Amino acid sequence: MPARLIARRSLFACLLALFASTCQAAMVECSLNTDRSQFGSQLELAIDGDACAQFSVGFLFYTQQEYEQSRLWYASAAEQGVTRAAFELALLYRDHLLDDPGAERVRWMNMAAEQGLVHAQIELAIDYIENPGDSAERVRVMSWLEQAAQQGDVKAMYLLGWLYGNDASGVQDMASDDELGMHFSLADDKALYWTCQAAERDDADAQMSLSDAYSYGRGTRVNQVQRRLWLERAASNGSEEARQWLDTSDMAWYSRLERWVKWQLVDETARCPDEAMAAFSE
């Protein structure tokens, strides 16, 4: 797994919109009430069994670092169908705010993912990439990512592309009559397609991966101009790895000047390989 994905996981977690104003669930749709002045009335409703109030009370306890109380109310809300409550509870375990001797994080994260919460599906996809399971788990994760990517989730696009290009669980060896397994088997063209979809939407990880593809000719022809252009886009989107590649401070000043002059003459923009665009053209 590329180090850039591990390094950016904590950053991605910060973007999960903890303060989102609404909560979509398979069974219950809730508005998150963050007004502490209404805590008393929300608590009364929660005690009476109101799932949305339980979710809000769990969140308010979380903001006060009363994690055990937060756990109790999130769990009650999740069991009544508030998908986001299951996800937030899983995060308490993931972030080591609660002890997790019995794999509770995985249990609650799976509940949220099975109910369609994209954030949970992506968390589990990253889990799989960091610790590959069997081929059935890979297919399940990629199915989630494909659904999220088709709905426009950029991080899902990148992860789906990464998985199409990398396999540690033997999906490529699955029987040819396993239609779903074959659909998610290794495929450089699909890897390029989804990586490009994310790169064009300014995902720095995807832009680095696309630069690598052009550099080594994986799924497309080697093109050092495009490699450089995608590196520059990744650097402009905050990739420290891209900045390091572009840093030529260890070169003699005249070499840096020659390279700078050369790049001023390049009349080209970063683009996706033709092979990527052809992946889903049929």
Image: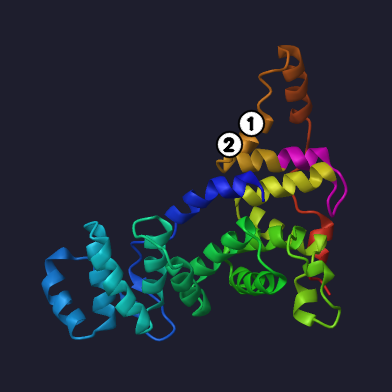
Location of residue 79 in the rendering, given as x and y in whole percent from the top left corner = 36, 82
Query: Mark 1 near mark 2, Cβ–Cβ under 8 Å?
Result: yes
Question: Left or right: 165 with respect to 199?
Answer: right
Q: Quadrant of residue 274?
A: bottom right
The amino acid beneath tag 1 is Gln
* Residue that appears at 63% across and 58% down: 129
Would you name the residue on which mark 2 appears?
Answer: 240
User: Could you tell me residue 167's position as x and y percent?
Assistant: 75, 61
Q: Is residue 122 magenta?
A: no
At 33% from the left and 62% from the top, the residue drawn is 19
Disc 1: which residue? 244
Q: Residues within 10 Å of mark 2 (few under 14, many from 20)?
A: some
Placement of the C terminus among the 4 image quadrants: bottom right
Q: Which mark is residue 186?
A: none
- Amino acid under label 2? Glu
Q: Is residue 161 above or below residue 206?
A: below
Say which element carries label 2.
helix
**Would you place residue 34 above or below residue 2 in this image?**
below
Above or below residue 145? Residue 44 is below
List x then y, in percent, for residue 273.
80, 54
In the rendered view, does 264 fall on the left or right side of 19? right
Which stretch appears magenta? 217-229
Count residues near mark 1 (Cα–Cα under 10 Å), then give few for <14, some for 14-19, many for 20+: few
Residue 228 painted magenta: yes
Q: Nearer the viewer, residue 24 or 144?
A: 144
The x, y position of residue 218, in whole percent, is 83, 51
Secondary structure under tag 1 reads helix
Visible in this render: residue 206? yes
Q: Is residue 74 left or right of residue 272?
A: left
Q: 159 or 255: nearer the eye? A: 159
x 64%, y 42%: residue: 233
